[in-house]
Image (cartoon, rainbow, N blue to C red):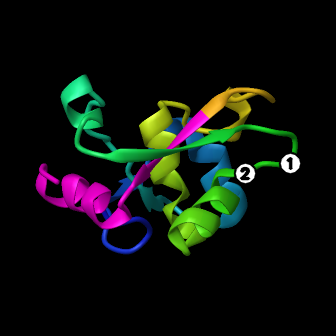
Amino acid sequence: MPRHGSESKMENTEELYEEFFEERGINKITHYKTAVWPPLTPEVRSRFSTIRHRWKTGDKYWKLANTHYGDSKMWWVIAWYNEKPTEAHLKAGDLVLIPVPLDQVVSFFNYGSA
């Protein structure tokens, strides 16, 4: 599941945005479709090892991804695995699980198996 590269895009021409379009002199906007993540079942969880992290003030998914994966763009893996799409869904003291190894997690997204 590539992020910001080859995802599906859509053209939005909804009348709801007509005023927005007129103000900007356009008749549509193009944006990424919402990602559809595979379900996180116990069987899927069992495919990966995890690193445990206790969430604290100032933590960000991208910082954890950079620390544990060496790539801040992989923040979405941590969000998916914890079923918390944004940092706003977490509070200090929450346990965050970081699935590893990253190549197996990405392989699961791309091919449905790790």
Quadrant containing the N terminus is: bottom left
| Callout 2 touching callout 1 (CB < 8 Å) | yes
Residue drawn at x 23%, y 43% is 47
Could you say where residue 88 lies in the image, as x and y percent from the top left?
A: 72, 33
* Residues at marks 2 and 1, CA–CA distance in whole angstroms: 6 Å
Residue drawn at x 32%, y 64% is 7
Residue drawn at x 30%, y 30% is 40
Bounds of the magenta segment: 96-114
Residue 58 - label: 1
Depth check: 96 or 8 in front?
96
Residue drawn at x 72%, y 58% is 23
Quadrant containing the C terminus is: bottom left
* Vertical order, 94 against 11 (above or below): above
For disc 1, the neighbor class at 10 Å (few under 14, some 14 to 19, many from 20) is few
Could you say where residue 67 lies in the image, as x and y percent from the top left?
A: 63, 66
Residue 60 - label: 2
* Vertical order, 61 against 70 (above or below): above
* Vertical order, 87 against 60 (above or below): above
Q: Of the residues shown, which amino acid type is indicated by label 2?
A: Lys
Q: Can residue 34 be seen in this view?
A: no
For disc 2, the neighbor class at 10 Å (few under 14, some 14 to 19, many from 20) is some
Q: Left or right: 68 with respect to 35?
A: right
